[in-house]
Amino acid sequence: MTYSVSLGATYLGDGRCRFHLWAPLAESVAVQIVAPEERLEPLTRKERGYFQGEVAGVVPGSLYYYLLDGQQLPDPASRYQPRGVHGPSQVVDAKAFSWSDRCWPGPKGKDLIFYELHVGTFTPEGTFEAIIAHLDDLRTLGVTAIELMPVAQFPGSRNWGYDGVFPFAVQNSYGGPEGLRRLVDTCHRYGLAVFLDVVYNHLGPEGNYLAKFGPYFTDRYRTPWGQALNFDGPGSDEVRRFFIENALYWLTEFHLDGLRLDAIHAIMDKSALPFLEELAAAVKLQAERLDRRVYIVAESDLNDPRVIRPQELGGYGLDAQWCDDFHHALHALLTGERNGYYRDFGTLGNLARAFREGYVYTGQYSAYRQRRHGRRPHPCKGNQFVVFTQNHDQVGNRARGERLSTLVPFVKLKLAAAVVLLSPFVPLLFMGEEYGETAPFQYFTSHSDPRLIAAVRRGRREEFAGHNWTGEVPDPQDEATFRRSRLNHGLSLQGQHRVLWEFYQQLIQLRRELPALTELNLENMEVITCEEDLVLFVRRWSRDSEVGIIFSFSNTATAPTLPLPAGHWRKRLDAAEERWLGDGSTIPALLVSQGKMQVPLTPGACLLFERIKEAQAD
């Protein structure tokens, strides 16, 4: 099936606008123009419950509702809700913006380094426009793509974005569609890709009018957030069309480079052609039409390789997935936490397994789940996994939203950064982690329904019961919770925060400079654990390059004997050096190995050696 972007109000020029709506539950549908002047225009019923009509005298900026059998409702495919989720929809001219990125090809997958940010808390202004002033810093740091948390219209002005109810409408308090287009265009001029987090597993509760138009939801499944979307029941073809058009809309009309699909494990679909597979195929076809690289990255806790397996091999064909196992293995080692899902992790072997395969659980018994979990992801490539020490979930879904910078000492922050950025996977940084931001990232809302507000407060308290975290859970509705979560960019210029920023920059530079790190090949890698010393030794190589990486998770000095291949090795990184606020390095700039070597390590040591070719050594 071939898809285009046709739902909603499409401005055709010359004061003409086409309205296209799926409303199979309605007998009659009309467009009610409410500004600049009021008028009523009936739409014609088409096949399969669609209504359509071309209306003259409608210009960009016009406000409208649909009247379904006399009931006034905003457009489910609204491009803009300037007065919020309960207000009228606005006609937008998608062709009015003057793009300057015509030759932008999109990034190569192996070059991606993500920087996840929340528009509302990244700056004091909380807008797309305010982000632009920080793009040069991000480029200098070395990231190649910013990933925006959801920007679909949500109730009020404070929200993570996962309560969005108008999937096509860009949040009004962030700057609307014009603001997002300007941000993307500017990012491309800086050489930065832009990905967007989209939510196709549920809609938020307030302002959610979809069920009044058609069978968008099903009672056959439930998600943690309520009714599941209908991707495999009666009427599901049109529901699929709605969300696939939404994906194409972001890529086509906003020039986005990719999408991050939220929690695909909550997309319930038993059809022979799964929605995710159909979505991936439609996006791939659109990328070919646009003649640029476009990616779809999934969030999934299934440890199911079908998510990223090519369609010709029976998979969904998504390009990559977030790798929670890698995070959990690393976090448990760094912090010693063992509550909740961390009870399944905490050994050096867990992290070694994550390095080798992406997943830790590939069919073993999970104590947390009380069943076997996962499947071996073979054959897969390193660029099919996105890894991180922090993200909005792993920080924000702690009871008080503490960042890693407040949980572990500075030496372990450096170690955590190195593990992620020197891994054979695609790294993701969460806004502020590069300089050790200390402000929490807490869960916040600005709902207007008192019953919903009470339910959200109660739900947050119940959610953390299994983690045994102490203290009061911050009130999501309190504006102070939102304000506490804003970044303080000024920290990046001070003391150890500045040093940490420079350490991240150095790691990214090494990742780009050394071919052994650039090629995300899981075959050309050896991972060895020294359990007694809590040391992980990773050797990676390519045709022209070889590196040895040492990570120590010990809190005491150790001296493991490591299988460093015979030859000359130049030290390229040592986190213990004084320039990185370490206690001083004990490792010489050049090592000569006979095949094994005892290496004295300080607590939390991180070292990178590059093998010198024999001609260079002489």
Image: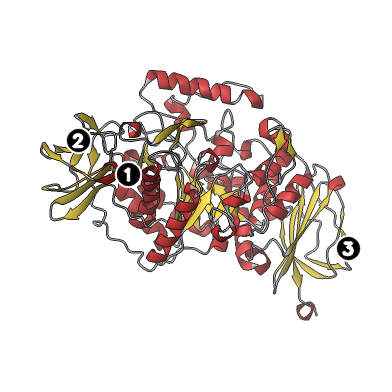
Q: Is residue 413 left or right of residue 139?
A: right
User: Residue beneath label 1, please?
Assistant: 175
Q: Quadrant of residue 14?
A: bottom left
The circle on residue 559 is: none
Q: Amino acid at mark 3?
A: Lys
Q: Amino acid at mark 1?
A: Gly
**Between 423 and 31, the one nearer to me in the picture:** 31
Q: Is residue 613 left or right of residue 479?
A: right
Residue 3 in picture, x, y percent from top left: 36, 55
Question: Between disc 2 and disc 3, whose residue precedes?
Answer: 2
User: Residue beneath label 2, please?
Assistant: 28
Q: Residue at x 78, y 46 (%)?
A: 349
- Up/down of 192 relative to 554, above or below: below
User: Residue beneath label 3, please?
Assistant: 596
Question: Between disc 2 and disc 1, whose residue precedes?
Answer: 2
**Between 95 and 369, the one nearer to me in the picture:** 369
**Between 20 and 345, the one nearer to me in the picture:** 20
Q: CA distance from mark 1 to mark 3?
A: 59 Å
SS of the residue under disc 2: loop
Q: CA distance from mark 2 to mark 1?
A: 34 Å
Q: Amino acid at mark 2?
A: Ser
The local crowd at label 3, few if under 14, some if 14 to 19, many if 20 or more residues have their Cα within 10 Å, is: few
Question: Between disc 1 and disc 3, whose residue precedes?
Answer: 1
**Between 548 and 360, the one nearer to me in the picture:** 360
- Asked whether residue 79 is in view, the answer is no
- Up/down of 398 relative to 333, above or below: above
Q: Select label 2 or label 1 by which is in front.
A: 2
Colour logic? secondary structure
